[in-house]
Structure formats: C-alpha cells, structure tokens
Image (cartoon, rainbow, N blue to C red):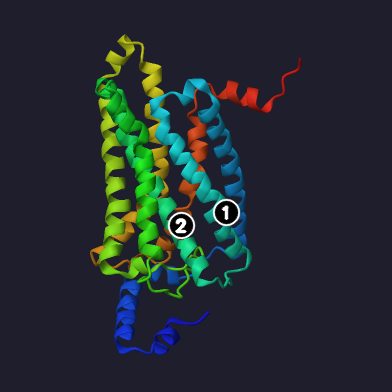
Amino acid sequence: MTSLYEFFFLSLHKKRFLILINMANIRNKRFSSANEVLAISYSVRFWLFLISDILSIQCGLFVLYQLLFDRNLRGKLSYYTITALLLINLIFQCITIPLIIHYYRLDGIWQITRPFAKISHFLNFALFATETILFAWCCIERYIIIFHYRWLKKPRRRHIFQYFPLIIISYCFIYYSLIIFYPFCEYIPYQSTINGVFIPCFLVDPILSKYDLILHQIIPLILIFTFTFLLFFRFVKRKRQFHRRNQWSKQQKLIIQVLVIFIVFCGFQFPWTVLQLCSLFGLSLNSLGNVKNYMFFFGYYVCFLLPIVCCGTLPDLRIKLKTFFCCKKY
C-alpha cells in the first residue's frame, strides 16, 4: 500500500498539497490509535468475529421472526423501534462484519478499489450511527409509553411514533451518502490496522468530523444515559401504582429490556466515544497506550450482543424456543 508521505509527494498542485497536509495533521490527532497494532493476532480476531457473528445472526433472525410474525408482539407500539434496530443490526452483520472478517483472513493485506472503499465507508458509518440514534429514540420512546401513554391516544401522535424510526434511518442514509459519495470528497489511502476500514474524507474535515461525532455519537449517548436513568428511578418510585393497576410485569419487562441494552452500549461503545470527545477538545491520550485500540476493537461487540440481549427479554421465551426448535408430532 502506498504510504501517506508518497501520496503527498505525488500531489502536483500546491493548493491540493497544502490541503492534504492539513488533513494529515488532523488525522494524526484523531486517528493515532489506528496506527498501533493490537496484540491480538489476525487469526484470533478472525475466529472471534466469525463465531460471534454467526451466533448473533442466528439469534437476530429468531428474534425478528418472533417480532414480525407473532401477532401479540407485532401490534405493540413498544416493539417498532426494536424491530427497526434489529433489522439495521442484521444488515450490518451480514455486509460490514464479513468484510472485516475477510480482512482478518488475509492477515491485514487487502487492497480494494476506491468505489468499493466508499461503499465500505457508507455501510460502516451509516449503519453504526443509525443503530446508536435508534437506541436513543428507543429510550425516549419507552419513557413516553410507560409514563405518558395518554399522550399517544391521538392517532397523529401515534403515527409519529410508528414512523419516526424510518425518519431516523432515512436521515442517516441520506446524510452519509451525501458526504461520502459527493465529488469533493478526497480519497485517502489510509487503512486502519484494527478493522481494515479505510478512513473516509469527512472524518479529517474539522467541521464535518465534529458534527458527526457530536450529533451522531455524543448527543445520542447523552440521551441514552438521561432517559434510562429517568426511566429507572421514576419506575422505582411509582412501582406501587403499577402494582395497583396490574401493569407491573408488563412495564417491568420494558424497563429490563432497555436497561440490558443500555449496559451493552455503555460497556462497549461509551468508552470509545469518551476518548473521541477528549481528543476533540485537545486532551492527550498517549498515556492510555493500546487500551484505546482494544476499546475500538471490542466496540463491535455491541452489534454481536444486541440480538442476544433482545432475545433474552422476549416474553415467554421458553415457550417460543420450544415451539420454534421442537417439531410437533401429530
């Protein structure tokens, strides 16, 4: 692969040369962790991702089957966003994760064309950002459904809740398609040694990179934290009222589902987002060494664990598993 210094040297125009040098300076500040090599070998990464992806896809298909074909679950407003979240996660697992697994299979030596690199950028960033924003909306949605359900009795407001996940998906796909496939986006031959993904040009732009980090990662995580804690503490305060109304088990399942997904997001995605936020404000992360690389690598386990978590929170899981896997004898 052509080094960055050779790429800069081959630039013919002075203005373009200065722009690329500026891009390199910003990149070295934000993506210095990607230059370091993980202690985990490519073969171990290959098997970790392959086994995790296969098991997670099977679990995701089972949960989606229950949400789409079970009449009791399909009509519930509280499962619309979870269904959209699992569908986006399944696409990510079936397209983006196999590309990373293929990179590991080749021991980190994989040359791809520019159009393919842009498609990889789009799938990686659009799908991952969509998942984060969808879960933030899921936390807000759960809070409104449990404590302000009367607000949803009007048909217009109910329709907004039903179609808001589609609005989020459309926004993310349109936004990333514009900033990645737009002609002004320069191709950067810089490949991450952690996952083999080439760095898209918008991440080295000082304005677009901050916009993407703040709007698509930091704000959704703040919303996830805020509404999850509000949901939990207000639920604990009002649990007596739920007992009186015979809604304890129903609301408890919704709370547990959000809390478990919240733990997965915070455990694997939140540390890396905090590091990016610190880097954005100019704080040095050199003292962390390779720790930030491991945070980046294991951040993908949000996608692997999400279907498993959703499967564990399905109502009547044992009965569904028996009827799904066991053949009935007539």
Where is residue 101 drawn, in percent x and y?
59, 59
Callout 1 crowding tier (Cα within 10 Å): few <14, some 14–19, many ≥20 = some
Estimate the x, y position of residue 13 in percent, counting from the top left.
Answer: 34, 88
Query: What kind of element bears circle 1?
Result: helix
Disc assigned to residue 49:
1
Question: Distance from label 2 to label 1 (Cα)?
Answer: 15 Å
**Of the residues under marks 2 and 1, which one precedes in the sequence?**
1
- What amino acid does circle 1 point to? Phe
Closer to the camera in the image, 104 or 187 = 187
Q: Secondary structure at mark 2?
A: helix
* Structural crowding at the residue carrying mark 2, measured as other residues with C-alpha within 10 Å and reported as few (<14), some (14–19) or many (≥20): some
Where is residue 125 drawn, in percent x and y?
Answer: 42, 57
Residue beneath label 2, please? 124
Image quadrant in which the C terminus is located: top right
* Viewer-side residue, 215 vs 152: 152
Residue 98 sits above or below residue 109 on the image = above
